[in-house]
Image (cartoon, rainbow, N blue to C red):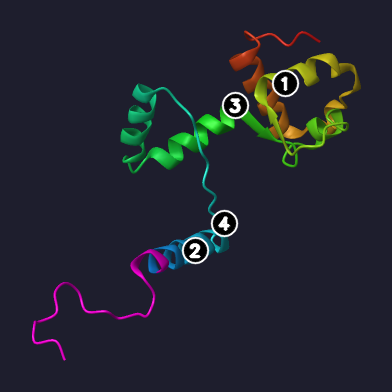
Amino acid sequence: MDPRPARGRPRTSGLSRAEQLRAAKRAQRSRERAAGIAAVEVRLPAGEAARLKAAMASPRFAAALADLLDDMVLDLERWPVLRELAWNRAGRWILAEEALGLYERNWRFVDLHRLGEPEAALVERLKARHGGGVLNA
């Protein structure tokens, strides 16, 4: 037996530190997938990346991000008339500007009785935000 006292933390696993770290990261990614959390890599200029990191510290960041995404991207599954107009698109999401363009180009096919209040409000919001207050139908 070595007469010198052990240094550092006691060894609690037969795995090396690097192997322990890999296993912990793998377990963390598995927990995040199970919770429905996905990592997204965003490439930004350094100044913008620093601003984003600072903004993420705010407790209101998630709500502000959700509002921004609601203004920029629409879920086709949520809007039935828009979904019919976008019948030839494979994806679930559509940019708000493209959605306004679909409404404008195909307005003659829109059944106003089927539009419903929420989707009519969406068209008004898109008109105000991306169409200068006008629907070019």
What residue span does the magenta drawing correspond to? 1-19
> Which residue is at the far front?
2
User: In the image, what residue occupies the spot 53% across and 41% down?
Assistant: 40
For residue 36, the mark is: 4
User: In the image, what residue occupies the spot 50% across and 59% down?
Assistant: 29
Nearest to the eye among marks 1 and 2: give it.
2
Circle 2 sits in a helix, a strand or a loop, which is it? helix
Circle 3 sits in a helix, a strand or a loop, which is it? helix
Residue with the mark numbered 2: 26
Q: Label 2 to label 4, Cα distance in Å?
A: 15 Å
Residue with the mark numbered 3: 72
Q: How busy is the neighbourhood of tag 3: few (under 14 within 10 Å), some, or many (20 plus)?
A: some
Nearest to the eye among marks 1 and 4: give it.
4
Q: Report if the CB atoms under discs 3 and 2 are less than 8 Å apart.
A: no
Three-letter amino acid code at disc 4? Gly
- The reply, left or right, for residue 91 in relation to residue 34 is right
Q: How busy is the neighbourhood of tag 4: few (under 14 within 10 Å), some, or many (20 plus)?
A: few
Nearest to the eye among marks 4 and 3: give it.
4
